[in-house]
Amino acid sequence: MSAASGKAQRAMVLAAGRGERMRPVTDRVPKPLIEVRGKAMLDWALDYLAAAGIAEAVVNLYHLGDQIEAHARGRQRPRITFSRETELLDTGGGVAAALAQLGPGAFYVLNGDVVWLDGLQPTLERLAQAWNEDEMDALLLLQPVTDAYGYDGPGDFAMDPVGRLCRRREREIAPFVFAGVQVLHPRLFDAVPEGAFSLNLLYDRAIESERLWGLRHDGRWFHVGTPEAIQGAEDALHDLSATAVQK
């Protein structure tokens, strides 16, 4: 990849989903507000954006959206605006509905329920340095399946030596899982369907034009998909913190 260009200045955090696999917890608390080590998962994402110098972020709302709005409204960094959905629009439809708030350039999109630890360099900074809008429509952060805490799926993508992505083939295990953090360019949303659709539709289009790229995460990443996984992630983070103190 060549030098970064068109560095992302704004961001979106996806926080509208129902969190079905996290029920019954999400019957009363939206998944992004579930706490891991004393901090809502939404705040893990927003704190990383603030540290990266992102001044404005859009948060989309649907399931128990009033709770999320009340929680996030008082933040100064980043400044939050909301995209309220009257029906669930899935990941792609949710971003498409907020494009006018995200501006004409590339932007970060973070899942509102991801927990990660940076490696030697801040993750969002690494993505910014790797981004090249002349070659890319999307740049996805990827976690090696073998080092994805709490994840037991078959993976999502394989990556060639320069960073272009392709899909896992049927009945195969892919080396990387999408980590829920990415940089997207608005042109990825040209000619998209009305209403709900998944970002996977746009990833597949970008693969066909060789414009879907990946960046391997060099820190820790935690899949917090079920109520049981909350305690597991907290225990793992505690162990990592204790190990760091001992060193």
Image (spheres, rainbow, N blue to C red):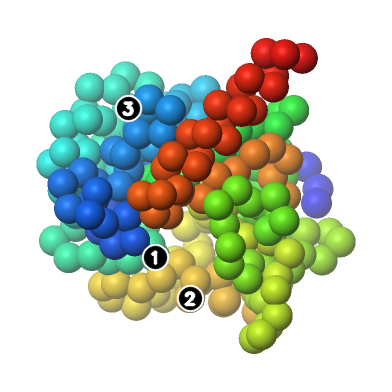
Packing grade of label 3 (10 A; few <14, some 14-19, many >=20) is some
Packing grade of label 1 (10 A; few <14, some 14-19, many >=20) is some
- Above or below, 238 relative to 89: above
> Residue, x 13% and y 41% (percent of image)?
66
Q: Position of residue 173 (x, y in %)?
A: 70, 74
Of residues 154 and 243, which is closer to you in this image? 243
Q: Amino acid at mark 2?
A: Leu
Counting residues from the start of the chain, the first of labels 1 and 3 encountered is 3
Report how far apart the C-alphas of labels 1 and 3 lie in the structure.
Answer: 23 Å
Q: Secondary structure at mark 2?
A: helix
Of residues 162 and 171, which is closer to you in this image? 171
Q: Position of residue 19 (x, y in %)?
A: 30, 57
* Tag 2 and tag 1, C-beta contact below 8 Å: yes
Can residue 119 be seen in this snapshot?
yes
Q: Amino acid at mark 3?
A: Arg
Check disc 1 and report the residue beneath it.
Answer: 92
Q: Position of residue 216 (x, y in %)?
A: 72, 50
Q: Amino acid at mark 1?
A: Gly
> Residue, x 45% and y 48% (percent of image)?
229
Check disc 3 and report the residue beneath it.
Answer: 79
* Tag 1 and tag 3, C-beta contact below 8 Å: no
Quadrant showing the C terminus? top right
